[in-house]
Image (cartoon, helix red, strand yellow):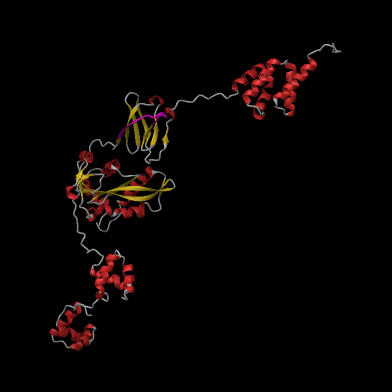
Amino acid sequence: MLKRETRTAILELAARGIGKRAIARTLGISRRSLQKVLSSGLAEPPALLRPHKAAAHREQILVLHASCRGNLVRVREELLAQGVDLSYQALTSFCRHSGIGTEPKTAAGHYHFDPGQEMQHDTSPHTASIGGRNHTVHSASAVLAYSGMMFFQAYPRFRRFECKVVLTEACRYFGGAPARIMIDNTHVVVLRGTGAAMVPVPEMVAFAERFGFLFRAHEKGDANRSARVERPFHFIEHNFFAGRSFTDLEDLNAQARQWCDQVNQRYVRSRRARPSELFAVERTALRELPVWVPDPYELARRSVDVDGFVTFDTNRYSVPEDWIGDPVEIRATLSQITLDHSRRGAVVHRRLLWPEGRHLTLPEHRRPRTKRPAPTDRELAQLKEQAPELIDYAQQLIARGKKQPTLALRKMLHMIRDFPRAPLRAAFAEAQRYGLFDLDRVETMVLRRIATDFFHLEGDQRS
């Protein structure tokens, strides 16, 4: 079919009195096509009204589309069962052009933002390799709507506390605060209502007053309103997290800040500038930060358990042992946790961000344990004092004897106290030479020597 420009040229050349053969040769078309255009006298090409192959079965397709829950593969199978030979491509083309199972396309619209007018905030879950294991983290991002400057951090979970942390860090990163922050209708900020009727939680209102901005929520289903922050999440997942591993969450957030520095320097074709260049203009329009910006914290009260620990987020933090049973106040920021005793001072710990039930003990919170003496120390001391020449045998007796060591050493002490020293030494020396550690047999050897050498019975010829 000839295009509109060609048909217009044919009509104009014919109106000048140029012959058909010359027009056809000049425009490179057939004289038959030329004659059709001249006969119609219209520059607009005629519409193609070719009926679709599936149009005759429209009602069947509508019924099957509803019963098959929109699955066009099943719709085609049911059509074939009913004797309608229709290819899958023809079916999907007909449904697409007829609006069956598809939503009508609408223009996304365009939003204009002045410098410093708005910052958009949202979160998205991602999988990160931390400490050699895959963890699900929540990436919280903040993007200035005018310049496109981006900042994001990751947390094990996302609550009101983490929301205040990331917005505080974003304002510090940008060096100022916008007039408003656009959010989705998240319960972290929203108390009730949606969109323009959204009422934020009083805690978040007080937080926003510190920086001088307001929270605003977009209408339900209007995700394009926060596209400035929605679009970068795909980039974060497939650029930042791809191929990177982290030792811990602190390392992840440190690398994320460096990555944001690099990304904010890249050229953005849709803006025809780098975000850092546009930020030079927007920076002057941001509200100045307060003179002192404290770190957001969580507040809680606990009692010290019998083990000398305070539990917070399932993790246990040590305190001095004389605090056991006393109440303490917990002030937890993202990086550290402070345990405050009303009379005994405060203890500061590094905060464990993952709720894993771990124990964190400071050495100064536990008294040095006195070394308990070995069960045989007292007997060995007495033995060394009374018969130091038998110490070597006693130590071998502890290692190789069959009796309980303490009882064996006590039996040796009784033998030293009851028997003369000379036969005793000789018996123990012989026993040690042959590796004999049965004290009953050693005692027999001592008695035999005593009977032979030290006692003279009546009728003995030697007397």
Give the image location of residue 451, x and y in percent. Answer: 78, 17
Where's the N terminus, which quadrant?
bottom left
Number of marks: 0
Is any atom of residue 260 visible in this view? yes
Q: Which is more toward the observer, 48 or 25?
A: 48
Region in magenta: 299-309
Is any atom of residue 428 visible in this view? no
Q: Which is more toward the observer, 171 or 273?
A: 171
Q: Is residue 375 left or right of residue 252?
A: right
Give the image location of residue 298, x and y in percent. Answer: 30, 36
Where's the C terminus, which quadrant?
top right
Is residue 308 inside the magenta stretch?
yes
Residue beneath the point at 69% across and 18% down: 415
* Image height of 344 relative to 70, above or below: above
Q: Is residue 353 left or right of residue 452?
A: left
Q: Which is more toward the observer, 362 or 179?
A: 362
Is residue 167 inside the magenta stretch?
no
Give the image location of residue 234, x and y in percent. Answer: 32, 55
Residue beneath the point at 22% across and 83% down: 27
Give the image location of residue 41, x and y in percent. Answer: 14, 82
Residue beneath the point at 64% across and 17% down: 385
Image quarter for residue 271?
bottom left
Q: Is residue 377 left or right of residue 416?
A: left
